[in-house]
Image (spheres, rainbow, N blue to C red):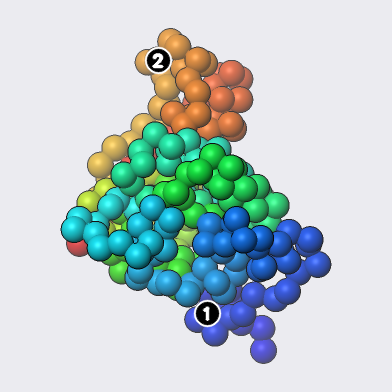
Amino acid sequence: MTRSVSDPDFKYTPSHNPYWEKLMHPPAELQGLAYADQHTETHRGDWIHQFPATRNQTLSNKPMLHVEVGCNAGHVCLEWAKLNPEELYIGVDWKFKQIYRLAEKAGDAEVKNLLAFRANAERLPLMFAPGEIDYLHMFFPDPWPKKAQMKNRTASEEWLKRIAPLLSGRGYFHLKTDHAAYFDFIRENLEKLKDTYEVIEETRHLHEHNPNAHLLKIPAVTLFERLFIKDGLPIHSIKIRHKT
């Protein structure tokens, strides 16, 4: 029987991708920085103690935990981590090489408040406990524009419902897209979940009133976002909070 990737009993399968082996058995300098597949579910509820910055420490105050879904090579979350050493960051992406490179860059820069996860976003509830995530970020996910592809969209009503309990209420979930139809899809799903989420900020043109938007650099914008701004495309943005 083929199990859904969101099923608790689902198991990732080994890959022939050379970076899969590197992630599953990372070199000493990357151990504890990169996690892949089922290993991303081994510290559910206790990730704040797995960072080099916090490991084996007694924390009087819980640091803010940011999770970026679809982080690609982690350009944004890595810069965030450098700028905010008192906060914690986890970059999640499906691609082996990008996550391995993110862990390498974090190690080379001696960034101790960032972890890199190669995992499927459908399994976030298996990776994190209720209230564990303070800020969730998802920027420019694949819009899957064709009708037959729409079932692959990450921000489905069911997914939004399942990940809501993971959010602590201290922060928010920030989504950005250049794709108007995908933004409509997100808004329609949130309307069905208005007892679960509150919208705290929303715009159809994030940089409309910034004449210098083309000068923005990472992490204020993503690599894709810089290209979209250059091409004059409006950026749709929404911040939502779980009604705890």
- In what element is the residue under mark 2? loop
Mark 2 or mark 1, which is nearer the start of the sequence?
1
What residue would you read off at disc 1? 7
In which image quadrant can residue 160 be found? bottom left
Residue 139 in percent (x, y) is at 50, 42
Residue 74 versus residue 204 in the image, above or below: below
Identified at 57% across, 62% down, the residue is: 31
In which image quadrant can residue 26 be found? bottom right
At label 2, the amino acid type is Asn
What residue would you read off at disc 2? 210
Residue 237 in percent (x, y) is at 41, 36
Disc 1: CA contacts within 10 A as few (<14), some (14-19) or many (>=20)? few
Q: Residue furthest bottom?
A: 1
Specify whether 188 is left or right of 1: left
Identified at 66% across, 83% down, the residue is: 2
Front in this rendered view, residue 204 or 84: 84
Measured Cα–Cα span from mark 1 to mark 2: 44 Å
Residue 42 versus residue 234 in the image, above or below: below
At label 1, the amino acid type is Asp
The answer to whether residue 82 shows anywhere in this view is: yes
Please identify the quadrant where the C terminus is shown. bottom left
Q: How many marks?
A: 2
The answer to whether residue 172 shows anywhere in this view is: no
Identified at 58% across, 77% down, the residue is: 4
- In what element is the residue under mark 1? loop
Identified at 70% across, 52% down, the residue is: 97
Q: Residue furthest top?
A: 211
Front in this rendered view, residue 89 or 158: 89
